[in-house]
Image (cartoon, rainbow, N blue to C red):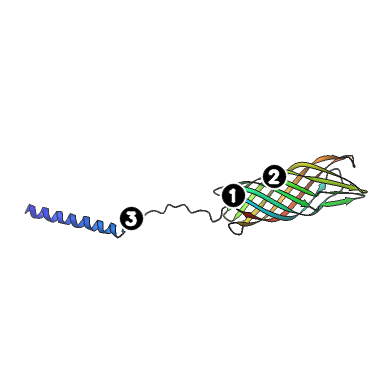
């Protein structure tokens, strides 16, 4: 009798083992596997970029009654590093500027300026909000009675902006900058002059 019971138990165990092997062959799993792949952000701001901009500037000249203003435009290039939603970068730009103003028989103008700035921002996927600041440099020109004098000076800039990704490579931006070009002495006026001004500009960037 005990031999019969033992044989039945052995047969049942053999059937159970064969059934489990068959289930493995046909891909059946007793438990579902957890999904552990990290999903990337919909848009990445990482890497180098280059672009152009167009805007308007207005300001004042120290030790002068002139308030130069005008259209400006130029090019910019930079690099972003992204960690999660935090974006840190550096950007440089060069601008041609039509800003000028005339008082009495003299005129002050700012033919060009440029900046080298750090950028710190927070990305909401395809929207980047950032603050920016750094070095500014440019020229101030004095003209009167057929004579002119140009001085180049350096100062600082501070601003903020928003950039919108149109595709993975192309983005558009709007940006405000306050620029303070340090004073330089002018022989023709006998006074030091510097140009402090605000700019608002829009632009596009191509990201590599």
Lower position in the chain sequence, tag 2 or tag 3: 3
> What element does badge 2 sit on?
strand
Q: Quadrant of the N terminus?
A: bottom left
> What element does badge 3 sit on?
loop
Q: Residue at x 19, y 57 (%)?
A: 15
Q: Nearer the viewer, mark 3 or mark 1?
A: 1
> What element does badge 1 sit on?
strand
Q: Nearer the viewer, mark 2 or mark 3?
A: 2
Q: Position of residue 87 (x, y in %)?
A: 59, 48
Lower position in the chain sequence, tag 2 or tag 1: 1
Distance (Cα) linking label 2 and label 3: 57 Å
Left or right, 149 with respect to 18, comes to right
What residue sits right under mark 1 in the picture? 47
Decide: is 20 above or below 132: below
Lower position in the chain sequence, tag 3 or tag 1: 3
Q: Residue at x 69, y 53 (%)?
A: 175
Decide which of 159, 51 is in the foreground and name it. Answer: 51
What residue sits right under mark 2 in the picture? 116
Q: Position of residue 137 (x, y in %)?
A: 75, 44
What residue sits right under mark 3 in the picture? 31
Left or right, 20 with respect to 142, comes to left
Q: Position of residue 61 (x, y in %)?
A: 83, 46
């Amino acid at each position: 009798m005990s031999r019969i019971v033992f044989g039945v138990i052995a047969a049942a165990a053999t059937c159970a083992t064969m059934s489990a092997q068959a289930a493995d062959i046909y891909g059946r799993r007793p438990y579902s596997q957890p999904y552990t792949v990290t999903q990337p952000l919909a848009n990445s701001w990482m890497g180098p970029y280059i672009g152009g901009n167009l805007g308007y500037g207005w300001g004042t000249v120290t030790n002068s009654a002139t308030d130069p203003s005008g259209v400006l435009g130029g090019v910019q290039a930079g690099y972003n590093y992204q960690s999660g939603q935090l974006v840190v970068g550096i950007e440089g730009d060069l601008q041609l500027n039509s800003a000028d103003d005339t008082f009495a028989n003299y005129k002050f103008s700012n033919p060009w300026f440029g900046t080298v700035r750090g950028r710190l921002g927070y990305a909401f996927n395809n929207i980047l909000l950032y603050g920016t600041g750094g070095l500014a440099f440019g020229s101030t020109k004095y003209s009167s009675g057929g004579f002119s004098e140009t001085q180049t000076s350096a100062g600082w800039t501070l601003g903020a902006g928003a950039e919108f990704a149109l595709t993975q490579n192309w983005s558009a931006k709007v940006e405000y900058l306050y620029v303070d070009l340090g004073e330089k002495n002018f022989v023709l006026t006998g006074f030091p002059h510097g140009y402090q001004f605000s700019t608002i500009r829009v632009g596009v960037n191509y990201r590599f």
